[in-house]
Amino acid sequence: MPAKNIISKENSFIRKYLQLRDKKKFRQEEQAFVIEGLRIVQDALQKPEQVQQIFCTETALKKYSELLLFQQQKIIQVSDALGKLMSDTEHTQGVFAVCRMPEQQAEISPSGKYLVLCQLQDPGNMGMILRTCDALGIEGVLFTECCDVYNPKTIRATMGSIFRVPMFFGNTPEELLHMLNQLKIISYASVPDKNALPLTSCAFNSGCAVWIGNEGNGLPEEIISSCQKITIPMRGGAESLNAAMAAGILLWEILR
Amino acid sequence: MPAKNIISKENSFIRKYLQLRDKKKFRQEEQAFVIEGLRIVQDALQKPEQVQQIFCTETALKKYSELLLFQQQKIIQVSDALGKLMSDTEHTQGVFAVCRMPEQQAEISPSGKYLVLCQLQDPGNMGMILRTCDALGIEGVLFTECCDVYNPKTIRATMGSIFRVPMFFGNTPEELLHMLNQLKIISYASVPDKNALPLTSCAFNSGCAVWIGNEGNGLPEEIISSCQKITIPMRGGAESLNAAMAAGILLWEILR
C-alpha cells in the first residue's frame, strides 16, 4: 500500500520536492532533482536505483497504479490539491519523482564524437538539444558554464533523454578544451562566420567534439581561436539559427 | 515630434494593440498583428507600408529615436508604465508596432521547394521553424490547420523572419495536397517510421513539398497514405525528435 495521503505543503517530503524544483543550489547540495509526468518517471525507473521517491496524487494512483505497481514501496500519495502545487505544468498528470544525479561523469573516449555546450543559457534549448543527441545517437554531451541541466524546464524538454545521454560537466571552457586536446579529440568551434569552413566540407572523423556557444554571444574568443572554425552555410535572410537548431543540424552532419 | 504621451490603457490605440496581441479572432478581423522589440520593428520597416503604428515609451524614445527617426509620423509615445502593460516579455525595450498582414498569399511555383506545416500547435516551434526556413532559404512555407502564425510567441521566435519568409495559408490538408498535386509538386510526408524512405536516400529535386505534422499525433492518415513517406534515421534512444528540430533537419537536407 502506498504511504498515507499527504495534504500539507509543510510536510518535509513536499518541502524538499519544492526546493529541488525551484533551487539550483539545493539540487547541487542534495545531488538530486525532480521530474514530473508518468512517461518520464517510467523512463527514470529503467534504473530504479536512481529514483528516490515517487509522488502520486489520489487521482493518478487510481489511473496509473498498475503502471507503477512494482515501485509501491517508493510511492507517496499526495492530495490532488498538493499535486497542483507541486506541478510545473498547466495540466498535471499527478505523477512526480525525486531522482539522484548520476554519481559519475560520462567517460570520454578518444574515438568518440561529442557535443560541447558552452555557456548555453536557455533551458528549453538545452533540453531540445539533449533530446536530439539521444535520438541521433552521439557518444556524449559535455557542458561548461551552462544553465542547470536539472532545471525542470530542461528536463521536460528532454522528454526522458536526460536519463539516456552520457553527460560530462567540465569546469571552465579552457580546462575542457585542454582535456579534449590531451585525448587528441579535435575540437570544432561552431560560428556564424561566412569565412569559416562550411559544415558540408568537413569530414567529422572519430575523435571529434563540436562546440556550441551562448545564444546571444556565441563562443568565447579564446575558444574560437584555439579550434577549427566551422559554420552552417546560410543563403537566406536570417543572420543566424537558434542555438538548438544549429546544434541539431551539426549533430545530423557529424553523425551522418 | 511624436504624438502626445499616452498614459491610459483605455486609449483606443492601446486597446486595439492589446486586443491584437491577445485575440486571434481580432487579428483576423483586422488583418493586423503586433510586434515588440527594436530589431523586429526595424525588420518590419524594411517595407514601411506594412507598419501601421509604432509605440515607443519615453525611455525608448530617448534611447532609440535616431534609429526610428524617419518614421516619426507613425510614432506614438506611451508612458513607461503603459509599455510594461503592453509588453509580452520580462524586460521590454519599450518599442512596439502594429503591422498589416500581407494582402496576398505567396506564389507557389512548380519548380520550388516548400515546407508544409500541417496541424502544428506550438507557437514556439512554429517560430523556430520560420527562422530556420529564412536562414536556410526555402521558397516558402505552406500552412494548414496550424496555430496562429501571428501569435506574439511565434513572432518573437521568428526573430524577424516572419517578414521575410513567403507564406501560403491553405484551407484543409486535403485541399492543399490537391493544389500541390495539380502543380506537379511532389509531396513527402515526414513520419517517425523505420519502414519509410530514409531522408538520406531521397533526392529532393525541384518541385517538392515536405509535410510536417502535429507535435503529438503527426500527420493525418489520409495525407500520409497519399504521399511518399520519408523519415529521419535515428539510432539513439529517443523515439522521436521535437517537431521543429525534425523540420530543421529536413530543411537542411532538402536544401543541401
Image (cartoon, coloured by chain):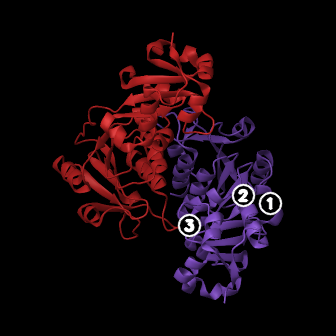
Chain colours: A purple, B red
The residue indicated by pointer 3 is A92
The residue indicated by pointer 2 is A22
- Percent from the top left, x then y, of residue B152? 47, 40
Looking at the image, is B234 positioned above or below residue A143? below
Looking at the image, is B226 positioned above or below residue B154? below
Query: What amino acid type is highlighted by mark number 1?
Result: Phe
User: Looking at the image, which residue is at 19% across and 49% down?
Assistant: B179
Q: Chain of mark 3?
A: A
Element type at mark 1: helix
Can residue A233 be seen here? The reply is no
Q: Quadrant of residue A11?
A: bottom right
User: Looking at the image, which residue is at 69% across and 74% down?
Assistant: A7
Q: Chain of mark 1?
A: A
Element type at mark 3: loop
Looking at the image, is B156 positioned above or below residue A25? above
User: Looking at the image, which residue is at 55% across and 67% down?
Assistant: B236
Q: Which of the two discs, 3 and 2, labels the residue nearer the N terminus?
A: 2
Query: What amino acid type is highlighted by mark number 3?
Result: Thr
Q: Residues within 10 Å of mark 2 (few under 14, many from 20)?
A: some
Which one is closest to the eye, mark 1 or mark 3? Answer: 3
Query: What amino acid type is highlighted by mark number 2?
Result: Asp
- Percent from the top left, x then y, of residue B130? 43, 42
- Percent from the top left, x then y, of residue B34? 44, 33
The residue indicated by pointer 1 is A26
Q: Which of the two discs, 1 and 3, labels the residue nearer the N terminus?
A: 1
Can residue B236 be seen here? The reply is yes
Q: Chain of mark 2?
A: A
- Mark 1–mark 2 contact, CB under 8 Å? yes
Element type at mark 2: helix
Label 1 to label 2, Cα distance in Å? 8 Å
Label 3 to label 2, Cα distance in Å? 17 Å
**Picture disc at residue A166:** none
